[in-house]
Amino acid sequence: MDAMKIGVIETGGLSLVPLAVEHADEMAEVLSDPALHVFIGGAPYSPQALRARYERLVTGSSDPSVTWWNWVIRLREEKCLTGTVQATVIDAERGCAAEVAWVVGTAWQGRGIATEAARGLVAWLQEQGVQGICAHIHPDHHASAAVAAAAGLAPTGHWHEGEIRWELPPTHILADDGGTEAGR
């Protein structure tokens, strides 16, 4: 999996744009609410700290078997950034697997943006041949659990660092229209 091959992922009302260092200033404002960190820990980054983080992310993992794919979520109608989605892809002998995550700024929550972005990301990963997709979600983060379920993931009952592992069932494959459909 080559990190340089990612491009813009278009969904109904969103453009998932490959992360660039230049996004740091706008994203620092989007992610500035401390409430976003209740379940994931930490605190909001300053624009300078976020710029340094984005520099590391766009450089990529030093482990050749791990690829970091990161996008900012652009709400096309309002022409603004609203959050991020990411996939950490690990190449394995039997195929590659990805751990996905998403975050949407407080001002844009409750509008279906995270759901649309996560569904678009999962569909795109499947198109790239990623065979296993998972997310780790805090048991009290009901909104994120709803996003995972809408993207086709299901809780497994396995725990990782205080979070429940959610996985895309093997029967969940892309439909011909570019969406996803379970049990096909």
Image (cartoon, grey):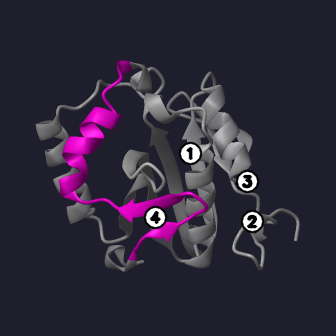
Q: Nearer the viewer, mark 3 or mark 4?
A: 3
Front-lying residue, 58 or 81 = 81
Earlier in the chain: of badge 2 and badge 3, it is: 3
Q: Is residue 30 magenta?
A: yes
Q: Closer to the observer: label 4 or label 2?
A: 2
Q: In the image, what residue occupies the spot 49% across and 47% down?
A: 101
Q: Who's the residue at 45% across and 61% down the image?
A: 16
Which numbered disc flags the more N-terminal residue, 3 or 4?
A: 4
To which residue does mark 1 refer? Answer: 113
What's drawn in magenta, residue-wise? 6-34
Task: Please say if the residues under marks 1 and 2 sit with CB atoms less than 8 Å apart.
Answer: no
Question: Mark 2: which amino acid?
Answer: Thr
Label 2–label 3 contact, CB within 8 A? yes
Judged from the image, the secondary structure of the residue bearing numbered disc 2 is strand
- The front one of 89 and 144 is 144
The answer to which of marks 4 and 1 sits earlier in the sequence is: 4
Residue 34 coordinates in the image, percent (x, y): 35, 20
Q: The residue under label 3 is which amino acid type?
A: Gly
The quarter of the rendered structure image containing the N terminus is bottom left
**Residue at label 4?**
89
